[in-house]
Amino acid sequence: MSAPLLELKDLRIAFPGPDGGWVEALRGIDLTLEAGDVLGIVGESGSGKSITMMAFLQLLPRGARISGSAKFRGEELIGMAPSRIRQIRGKAIGCIFQDPLSAFNPVIPLGDQVAEAILLHDGAVSRRDALKEAERLFEMVSIPQAGRRIRQYPHEFSGGMRQRAMIAMALANRPDLVIADEPTTALDVTVQAQILDLLGDLRRELGIGLVMITHDLGVVAGIADEIAVMYGGRVVERGPTDPIFYETAHPYTAGLLGAVPTLDGTGALRQIEGTPPSIFDRPPGCSFHPRCDRAKPICASDDPALRDCGSTECACHFPLVRTLAEVAG
């Protein structure tokens, strides 16, 4: 059998703390993505979603300590030489960053920036041909009048059009994997739907693997094959998309779902009381227990491991569904 497109095992990241020690930002992440599939990574700000993906691309701040394994098509990325990782970033792995306005250079036309990504990884192509390819990519992501728009600057594009240009850049070198970090943030719901439809169409047409990072479970509902819910620097629930929604096991996942409006407008939106923990002041035991209405004394002292919780895996002492062992017993 061929190796998974992306495989993370016990991935951990620590930063220097204010007292001279180390503070863990990621605490043992295990995730797998097969070629052509979509993995949704969901959680509130500060849960560790973005830093998980930035870790193996060697885009972490200086001073960070990383351990564990992150393999791309069977090749270990952790500890890889900078010259080799630069060959992979932008070529085999494309990135769609959160804010395209700040990700693009404001004083260079967008077409030139996309062409630069092509020229960087293909020394045989001319600048003229790279610009033609940038125009084709703009057309592929439904940017109208692509021949004219490649000569424009980021501030001349709307938020939705800038996001499309960022997607075009991510696809410039026909990557096998695309990491989309909050690709619909700050966009209105109509444009959000257009971007999600575009990503879904490109995934099917090009056969790319896609990691969708978001705080909104509704964003990944119609596009992800599997979902990993993160909280406090670790995965607290993971499984196929339908069971995550309809056989929810972890109280935190249930809280996120309760904050998603329904199409018919019935039912009050529920909020999760409190705020996510800081990595500098993480509570003992289960990180979610101060905000959980199912918490018991063991939750404040014992951090549960991921285990079988019916149709998903969850890290909870008192999941919302009974495990297979509990049913059998």
Image: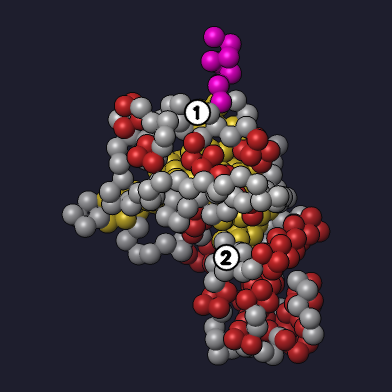
Q: Give the residues in magenta.
A: 321-329
Mark 2–mark 1 distance (CA, rounded to whole Å): 31 Å
Q: In which quarter of the image is the C terminus?
A: top right
Chosen colour scheme? secondary structure
Residue shown at the point (41%, 46%) measured from the top left:
273
Query: What residue is pinned by disc 1?
Result: 319
For the question of whether residue 4 can be seen, the reply is no
Depicted 317 relative to depicted 148: above or below:
above
The local secondary structure at tag 2 comes to loop
Q: Quadrant of the N terminus?
A: top right
Disc 1 marks a residue whose amino acid type is Pro
- Residue 219: image quadrant is bottom right
Residue closest to the far left: 19
Which label's residue is closer to the chain start, 2 or 1? Answer: 2
Number of numbered tags placed on the structure image: 2
Residue shown at the point (68%, 84%) measured from the top left:
111
63 relative position to 199: left or right:
left
Mark carried by residue 185 = 2
Depicted 25 relative to depicted 99: above or below:
above
Residue shown at the point (38%, 31%) measured from the top left:
295
* Percent position of residue 154, x then y: 61, 84
**Residue nearer the viewer, 62 or 289:** 289
* Percent position of residue 215, x then y: 54, 54
The crowd level at tag 2 (other Cα within 10 Å; few <14, some 14-19, many 20+) is: some
Whether 256 is among the magenta residues is no
Whether 322 is among the magenta residues is yes
Disc 2 marks a residue whose amino acid type is Thr
The local secondary structure at tag 1 comes to loop
Depicted 308 relative to depicted 19: above or below:
above
